[in-house]
Amino acid sequence: MSQQQFPSTGSALAGKVALITGASRGIGLAIAERFVDEGAQVILVSRKQDQLDEVAAQLRSRGATAHPIAAHMGKLDDVRELVDTLDTRGLAVDVLVNNAGISPPHEGSLTDTTEALWDKVMDVNLKGPFFLTAAIGKRMAARGGGTVVNISTTSALMAQPEIGTYCISKAGLNTMTRCFARELGPQGVRVNAISCGVIKTAMGDHTLNDPGRYADMMKINPLKRPGYPEEVASTALFLATGASSYSTGLILQVDGGVLA
Ligand SMILES: NC(=O)c1ccc[n+]([C@@H]2O[C@H](COP(=O)([O-])OP(=O)(O)OC[C@H]3O[C@@H](n4cnc5c(N)ncnc54)[C@H](OP(=O)(O)O)[C@@H]3O)[C@@H](O)[C@H]2O)c1
């Protein structure tokens, strides 16, 4: 099932440049597709250049301008190189979507978490998005505006020790959203986040393909189904555009109502 709840005008992002991390599949790909359908030029970022090239080719066949640029969001050298590449190519970002993320399950107890796992999760889910937002947010502010959309999770609010570092990293992303919203708001840059429930992607399938986890999720989900990447994409479009012009520092639930 695929759902598109926010009607398309075909021009909500006309003339805008949007950078989406984790754009090779899942939620990031759906956001890139939705933004292209609304007239945006897109910068596609993930680790694997060949996969990004394929996505870019698909989007170009729909008439889009797409720039596939490989970068590891957990490596600050890659983040800096990405920003340098944008500057060199004259790509001024109007919309930044920090979507790339990982949620590796812990082996054993949370109390036995290794420093390596902690660093890996924090680097990709928090450090990379922080420094990318700092660099691009500064450029947006200098140009008089822009929007940032961070892709977070209900797990930031509902403790799940088996993916505890993920929960903690995304709680940090929520607070990062509010800090940058206050810092950059006076200069016309709005910073918001989407708090996703379980969404049908490679990452979401970890829960959806496990009958026990799926049953647990359904017990607390009033809509009694998982979400779809297109439903996150339509919310990202709302937060990226003037449709949400009086909102910043918002953590918007797209979770089937699990926190209701
Ligand atoms: N699916 C859910 O149920 C769910 C729920 C709540 C929140 N979220 C959040 O939604 C976001 C997207 O998740 P998804 O479900 O679409 O996951 P996904 O299907 O696993 O896609 C993840 C994307 O991020 C990229 N990526 C992973 N590590 C990266 C890195 N180090 N540097 C750059 N790119 C990287 C991947 O490409 P490469 O592997 O090629 O780099 C891929 O494009 C994540 O932040 C996740 O936490 C998802």
Image (cartoon, helix red, strand yellow):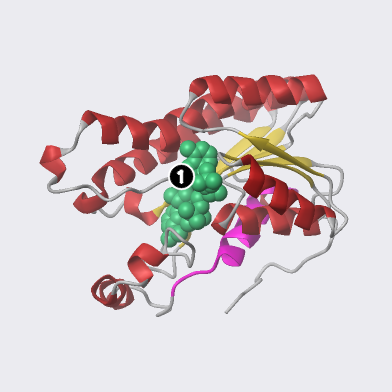
Quarter of the figure with residue 16: top right
In the rendered structure, the answer to whether residue 190 lies left or right of residue 214 reads: right
- Residue located 62% across and 30% down the image: 185
- Residue located 18% across and 38% down the image: 113
- Residue located 66% across and 50% down the image: 244
**Label 1 amino acid?**
Gly
**Residue 250 seen in render:** no
**Where's residue 215, x and y in %?**
27, 77
Mark 1 highlights which residue? Answer: 101
Answer whether residue 175 is magenta in the image: no
**Residue 113 seen in render:** yes
- Residue located 64% across and 59% down the image: 30
Answer whether residue 234 is magenta in the image: yes
Chief secondary structure of the magenta portion: helix
Q: Nearer the viewer, residue 107 or 197?
A: 107
Image: 197 above or below 249: below
What's the magenta region? Answer: 226-242
Q: Nearer the viewer, residue 239 or 38?
A: 38
Image: 33 above or below 200: above
Beta carbon at label 1 within 8 Å of ligand 1: yes
Image: 96 above or below 159: above
Quarter of the figure with residue 89: top right
Image quarter in which the C terminus is found:
bottom left
Q: Secondary structure at mark 1?
A: loop
In the rendered structure, the answer to whether residue 130 lies left or right of residue 121 reads: right
**Where's residue 45, x and y in %?**
63, 40
**Where's residue 187, x and y in %?**
68, 25
Image quarter in which the N terminus is found:
bottom right
In the rendered structure, the answer to whether residue 35 lies left or right of residue 104 reads: right
Graded by Cα atoms within 10 Å as few (under 14), some (14 to 19) or many (20 or more), the crowding at tag 1 reads many
